[in-house]
Image (spheres, coloured by chain):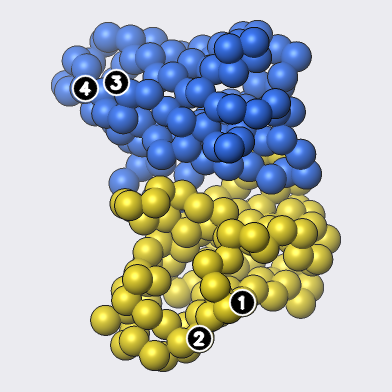
Chain colours: A yellow, B blue
Amino acid sequence: DAGVIQSPRHEVTEMGQEVTLRCKPISGHDYLFWYRQTMMRGLELLIYFNNNVPIDDSGMPEDRFSAKMPNASFSTLKIQPSEPRDSAVYFCASSLLGEQYFGPGTRLTVT
Amino acid sequence: SQQGEEDPQALSIQEGENATMNCSYKTSINNLQWYRQNSGRGLVHLILIRSNEREKHSGRLRVTLDTSKKSSSLLITASRAADTASYFCATEKNNNDMRFGAGTRLTVKP
């Protein structure tokens, strides 16, 4: 398996623009997680899904953030409108038996 | 909070020395996991220790868990320059909901 795949790897956008981050989990994994990592706040859990159903989105910062998982092999994290404070590395991870496998991350810069 | 907190924040040692990193948490957990992150990369799972286990080994890694003190330690023996990375503990209470600490930045000097 290729592991967790995220795209794009880097995204630079202007404030106010919509940003969509994509994730393909490892085949067969039934949990999918979205994290955000910054120097100030460290690694934060934003939302996670079990069998494509959102279980806990309490970590989503505000209504500008939304996540979907239309099927077992794809998830998106959308920010609309984006703000400079959203600049961070966003990680997707998937798991089956507790151990999480992380993707390479998307480095988002909002100017 | 369930979130683990690592100590120290940064650690610098010479190659060949042992490195010990600690993690404390506040609530009961099902298991505790340690992850490693190289600069600019995603996290890589190192080891999982369940709440009914006290010690676990994997190669040069040794993890202990003391649920009465709500603490864990990660020991890397005979460190190498390639061990330079950030190390995170993550506590899982239920349903795969894991919370990560701020991490320990380990530097191993050749």
Amino acid type of disc 3?
A: Arg
Q: Which residue is mark 4?
A: B12
Report the Cα–Cα distance between label 3 and label 2.
Answer: 44 Å
Image quadrant in which the C terminus of chain A is located: bottom left
Q: Chain of mark 3?
A: B
Tag 2 secondary structure? loop
Q: Which residue is mark 3?
A: B80
Foreground mark, 4 or 1, reads 1
Q: CA distance from mark 2 to mark 1?
A: 8 Å
Q: Does residue A28 show up? A: no
The answer to whether the residues at label 2 and label 1 have Cβ atoms under 8 Å apart is yes
In percent of width and height, residue A72 lies at 78, 67
The mark found on residue A66 in the picture is 1
| Residue type at the position of mark 2 | Gln
Nearer mark to the viewer, of 3 and 2: 2
Is disc 2 surrounded by few (<14), some (14 to 19) or many (20+) residues within 10 Å?
some
Residue identified by numbered label 2 = A80
Snapshot quadrant of residue A1: bottom right
Q: Is residue B2 left or right of residue B43?
A: right
B70 vs A49: above or below: above
Q: Are marks 3 and 1 in contact (CB under 8 Å)?
A: no
Q: Residue at x 52, y 40 (%)?
A: B100
